[in-house]
Amino acid sequence: EKGVNKAAALRELGDSLALTEKQRERMVKLVEGKVDPLPFAAQLRNSTAGGMVLNDLLTVSLSRGLYDARDRDAIRRMAVALGVPWSDFSATEQAIAYTYR
């Protein structure tokens, strides 16, 4: 796989957010699309980590080489749950897309 190592990116995100092992397991399931992101986001809603979480989710999705509408929809739902304006994240997404053109 090209790009960022997904496992390493998730470990780093878990470390930076000081997540418990149970929270880390749920985060992995979240990234893999196996759970609803809203309960996870609710735990971070009043935190300044919202934008970082979205960017890290984008990085992990891109590292798989399969960023598609399902990933984008999951990240959009997470942005809503975290209270992060979609326009803020969309600007980051567009900048990365421009880099890959």
Image (cartoon, helix red, strand yellow):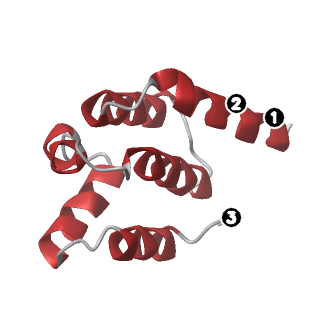
Q: In which quarter of the image is residue 39?
A: top left
Q: Residue at x 37, y 45 (%)?
A: 50
Q: Mark 3 points at which residue?
A: 3
* Amino acid type, callout 3: Gly
* Amino acid type, callout 1: Tyr
Q: How many residues crowd around disc 3 within 10 Å: few (fewer than 14), some, or many (20 or more)?
A: few
Q: Quadrant where the N terminus lies? A: bottom right
Q: Residue 61 carries which label?
A: none
Disc 1 to disc 2, C-alpha distance: 6 Å
Q: Residue 98 carries which label?
A: 1
* Amino acid type, callout 2: Gln
Q: In which quarter of the image is residue 54?
A: top left
Taking 24 as reference, is 52 above or below it? above
Q: Of circles 2 and 3, which is in front? A: 2
Q: Which residue is drawn at 49% across and 55% down?
A: 56
Q: Residue at x 24, y 69 (%)?
A: 24
Q: In front: 71, or 59?
A: 59
User: Could you tell me which secondary element the residue under label 1 belongs to?
Assistant: helix
User: Looking at the image, is mark 1 or mark 3 earlier in the sequence?
Assistant: 3
Q: How many residues crowd around disc 2 within 10 Å: few (fewer than 14), some, or many (20 or more)?
A: few
Judged left or right of residue 79, residue 4 is right
Q: Measured from the top left, where is residue 59 in percent x and y?
A: 56, 54
User: Could you tell me which secondary element the residue under label 3 belongs to?
Assistant: loop
Q: Which residue is drawn at 32% across and 29% down?
A: 77
Q: Mark 2 points at which residue?
A: 94
